[in-house]
Image: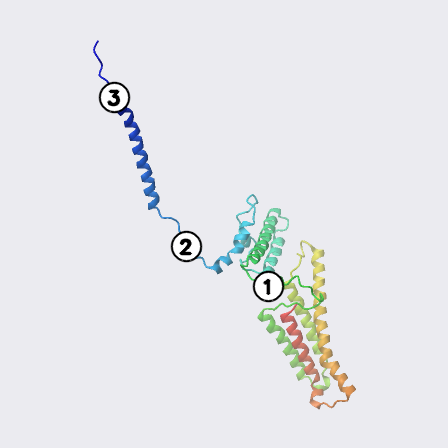
Amino acid sequence: SSSRPSIDTSHTHARPHTHLTTMAFTISASISARASASPRPSLSGARKTSAPRARFSVARRAAAGGMSSDAAGANDDPYKTLGVKPDADAVAVKRAYNSKQMLYKGEAAKLATVERAYEQIMQASLTARLSGASKVDKSVAFADRVRTSKWAPIPCPSPMKDVLVNYGLTLGCAFVTLVTPPSMRTLQVSIFAALLMVFRMFVKLVDVDPGPNAVLDPPAAQKHNNKRFARSFGVVLGTFVATLFATFWLPQFLIEVLQLTVPAWVLLHQEVFVSTACGLVLASLVSFYR
């Protein structure tokens, strides 16, 4: 029998192992090179965002985040749904909400979308105030203060055009009283001016306090409207009577009781002074309070 040559198996088994190890190192080096060559995202861009712009977007982000993922129309912008700007005040949002409710009356799906958008905007406004991203009006910040009377005037500045109209009406009534002959002057012009200011106050209350929708809830809207009428008459006429007492009745009483001597021109133009004083007080009341 012929002898077979011996085979060294140590080298044959080591070669595949060495080849696989070399391939693993090559792949690892390639991945590391690509990772080091690719640019890393920088966080400085997010930090460069200006604070006012970030604060401006708080309400929009909160409104978008407040909608549930399974709700219909979850991706809709609530501000676009109501047709208002992101910086619109509560009065404008409420007015747009009532308008959309009237427009989509009887359409349950659209009414649900409008209701959801209104709730999101209100929640976003609250979130922005709590986070300090928006200024809080004094009437909201101090809403928990106890008022001495429900009839007490509440600070509420009017737009400049309304202020000019109010003071223009006052000057007009004073001018009519001035050109009227002294023997024919009465307080009727002042009373007419007071009734005008009652109407102006009522119109202002309609704008700043829309109340319930008259189409969707007529009884509540009628009740709210009656309260506006009562407040307009009570606040304006109460102020008018107090001013009239201080500028007309009280001076006459003191002159008669104390037998004071006053110039004749003061007595002749007393109605002019009274009309001007009452008009200025009422114009200031309607322009800067409600």
For disc 1, the neighbor class at 10 Å (few under 14, some 14 to 19, many from 20) is: few
Q: Residue 268: x percent and y percent?
A: 71, 87
Marks 2 and 1, the one that precedes in the sequence: 2
- Give the side of residue 253 with respect to residue 277, left or right: right
Q: Mark 3 points at which residue?
A: 8
Q: Which residue is drawn at 68% across and 79% down?
A: 275
Within 10 Å of disc 2 (Cα), the crowding (few <14, some 14-19, many 20+) is: few
Q: Where is residue 154 in the image (x, y as percent from the top left)?
A: 66, 67
Left or right of 148 on screen, residue 102? left
Where disc 3 sits, the SS reads loop
Classify residue 220 by image quadrant.
bottom right
Image mark for residue 137 = 1
Which residue of the protein is positioned furthest toward the right in this rendering? 257
The three-letter code of the residue at mark 1 reads Asp
Pointer 2: what residue?
44
Q: Which of 186 and 47 is in front in this view?
A: 47
What's the residue type where badge 3 is placed? Asp
Q: How far apart are marks 2 and 1 (CA)?
A: 34 Å
Q: Could you say where residue 15 lies in the image, as x and y percent from the top left?
A: 27, 27
* For discs 3 and 2, the disc positioned in front in the rendered view: 3
SS category of the residue bearing label 2: helix
From the image, which quarter does the N terminus lie in?
top left
Residue type at the position of mark 2: Ser
